[in-house]
Amino acid sequence: MANVFLSYDHEDMALARALAGALEKAGHDVWYDRHIHGGAQYSRKIEQALEAADAVVVLWSERSLDSAWVRDEAAEGRDRGKLVPLSIGGVAPPMGFRQFQTIELGQWRGRGKVPRLAQLLEAIENQATEGPDNPAPPPSSRARHGAPPRETRRWWPWAAGLATLLLLAAAGWWLLGRQTLPVVAVVAADQSARSAAGADDLYVKLGSLAQVGEGKWQLVDSAGADRADLLFRTADQSTGGEPRTNLVLLDGKKDMLLWSREFSGSGASLADIRLQMSLAAGQLLACALETRAAGGLKIDLQKRFLDACAQSSEAGFDDPTPRLASLRAVLAAKPRFVPAWERLLDAEMTANDLAMFGPGGSDTTTAALRKSIAEAEKVDPDMPTLMLAKVYLMPRSEHGQRIDALRKAVTKAPADARLHAQLSNEYSQVGRMREAVEAAEKAADLDPLSPGMAALRIMSLAYAGRSKEAERALAEANRRWAGTGAIRGANWAYHLRYGDPAVARANADGEALQAMESYLRAREGGPAAAGPLLADVAAVPPENVTMAYGWGLQALAEFGTVEDTLQWLAKAPVEVVEEGSYMVFRPNLAKVRRDRRFLGVLARTGLLRYWRESGKWPDFCSEPGLPYDCRKVAEAHA
């Protein structure tokens, strides 16, 4: 079988992953997941992979046409006589590559069977057996007669989350007139083998950020540390079998400490600790480069800003209070510093969420958020987090207003994964589960380095009833991010409801496990063991229905009767049903949705009004055999 080099734009990651899977299933060795651009070390690895390749498969798309790296790799394949070009959506290859027969994959989006797979496998086999001296294939008919017009781009040709920050920061670096790329170095703080291994691990993980940044900054190891603008030093200080690592970020030119932290955890493995460290380092790197692009900060403010950034990473704290203090100090000194506004708004939304469940309520935090929104809008009205904050404060019952605002925000910032993630949540609130999955998958593709976005994709698939796909996505996430809070949460949430209760128990914290113990026992024992669970639900007094709404609905839908479930929905406060409307569209409520009284129970919320006015009906209304017409029943309750 052949060694295949797969060249693609990172925004086409989902297509590349599916394509590589098909080729590997056919027995080929595919090099694609280390397609890293950012520094001489990684460039050399690409060269080595190209030299070893029997075939260079190039995926031409709207995105890859603009990628200098893809063109260079395609040129290498062409010049070595190894090129196998593919096209998505009728895209014509750029000049210099149109004399080769291109295999058209049509509108394939990475799901289902790869179109023209047999033709592709034959082309790879021909390249592998004939070698570089084989004559160029005849020009394709599509090249002679011209290609169809390109489709409008679905999103910008770069990734989101940390990737977006890196790319924007790098672009700003050039706009400021710098003639050299920012250099980032990773070194071990001492000579121990474990510290060296930790530095190597961080170097590789940061290399994946360089992949999305498309070579706009340089990553070097200890050999290039003397020319680093930013320098990470890591030391392994594990003792007595307990893993512990230190990470320090320095200004490489001034040899000045910018940030430091120790990473440890009871029961955590060394791999978990290193993963936490790399996630924090990626966030820090993004924020440091973003600070440079925005004109820089005085050293004391820069330290406070970086500290706030690190706290918002996967390894950070849930309590936003330390972040709020640091970010407000930065903005007091530099009121137009957009990166701090973005993070302040995010922290204030978190603070408001926490205050809702506190003794004093959220009036104070909501007022603070409204004030920050007004101030931030004067600085930059198109900040993605500002647009999210505005939607956050809209009434939950105004589904159409919220969805329209998010769709407009996505057109302004199409590469921001958070906007797509929130749009996924809004679609799930109104029962548009297919679109919820699509938005979640786009968010995960735009921010492929985020465990949180991966968790969103997993649970969107599960709640849409696509359990097999959810299981595959969860298995992949466990391979990449085992030990992170987001993936532990996904394991708990998925296995609690659909998978193995034992796995749910292993991933639960004590409080969550205690709250759901009777439910887990019912799942382990089946309907015959559900008596104690149903008794717990029946014992909930009316004044406590709000706190018990979610688990009570789950329990009744799975183990109780339709009648009991409808009564539970009817007696829950309307604002609680509105806030948690996504729950009624989950798979375990299928039998409840088939009862025409279901829509009547929802009539007191804003859902029926939204469906009638928008004409966007929930997915279940189109299910075969539904014993009523959603439109007619909804009109009867108008």
Image: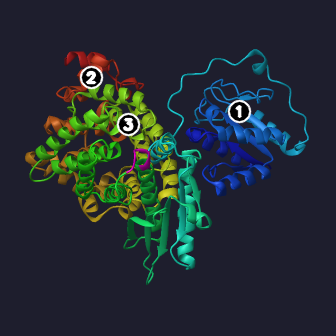
Which is in the foreground here, disc 2 or disc 3? Answer: 3
> Which segment is the magenta one?
292-296
Q: Which residue is mark 2?
A: 610
- Who comes first in sequence, dot 2 or dot 3? 3
Q: Mark 3: which amino acid?
A: Leu
Q: Is residue 571 visible?
A: yes
- Who comes first in sequence, dot 1 or dot 2? 1
Q: Which residue is mark 3?
A: 419
Residue 499: x, y in percent?
42, 53
Is residue 40 or residue 200 the one in the foreground? 40
Q: Residue at x 44, y 40 (%)?
A: 443
Q: Secondary structure at mark 3?
A: helix
The outermost residue toward the bottom is 240
Picture quarter with the C terminus = top left
Left or right placement of residue 25 versus residue 256 in this view: right
Which is in the foreground here, disc 1 or disc 2? Answer: 1
Give the CA distance from mark 2 to mark 3: 21 Å
Residue 418: x, y in percent?
38, 40
Residue 637 falls in image quadrant:
top left
Q: Mark 1: which amino acid?
A: Leu
Residue 610 falls in image quadrant:
top left
Is residue 10 or residue 529 the one in the foreground? 10
Please rate how many residues cluster around mark 3, counting C-alpha atoms within 10 Å: few if below 14, some from 14 to 19, many from 20: many
Q: Which residue is mark 1?
A: 86
Magenta region, mostly helix, strand or loop? loop
Q: Secondary structure at mark 2?
A: helix
Q: Secondary structure at mark 1?
A: strand
Residue 393 lies in the magenta-colored region: no
Q: Mark 2: which amino acid?
A: Tyr
